[in-house]
Image (tube, grey):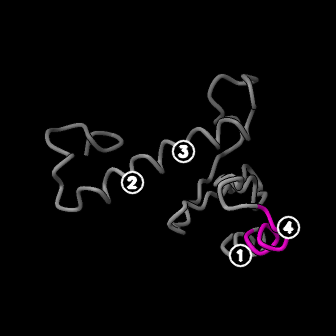
Amino acid sequence: ALDVVEERLEALGAAGGKEKDKDCYLGELLPLEDGAVHGYVTPTWATLLLVLRDGAVAGNGSEGGVQGDARRRLRALHGAYAKAMAAPLGGGHSGAGWAPGGW
């Protein structure tokens, strides 16, 4: 999947689009037997990959379908990542339940 990320980024660079016009969501990168890998590259070049199994889409048939659901989940993950990087010593994560699953 990381090879596909590089290919997509090279294609975006070759297209000559402005940096602010580029969407961080790269779309479905790799189809799997029972799902797909979706990619997202942050403005600071952190690469986020999300594996969604078939049938794991929130709201089945809601606006945007699988692509929209993957985009929303990756944006939320990017927000959590940015928050963690802003407070690397854990200042923003006090109390139980800050992590997925409460661990």
Residues at marks 4 and 3, CA–CA distance in whole angstroms: 24 Å
Q: Which residue does the image show at 23% across and 56% down from the upper left? A: 87
Please name the residue that numbered disc 1 is placed on: 6
Please tell me whether the stretch drawn in magenta is mainly helix, strand or loop. Answer: helix
Please name the residue that numbered disc 4 is placed on: 15
- The tag earlier along the polypeptide, 4 or 3, is 4
Residues at marks 1 and 4, CA–CA distance in whole angstroms: 14 Å
- The tag earlier along the polypeptide, 2 or 1, is 1
Q: How crowded is mark 1: few (under 14 residues within 10 Å), some or many (20 or more)?
A: few
- The tag earlier along the polypeptide, 3 or 1, is 1
Please name the residue that numbered disc 3 is placed on: 75
- The tag earlier along the polypeptide, 2 or 4, is 4
Q: Is residue 72 above or below residue 35?
A: above
Disc 3 is placed on an element classified as: helix
Q: Where is residue 8 in the image (x, y as percent from the top left)?
A: 77, 68
Residue 35: mark in rendering: none
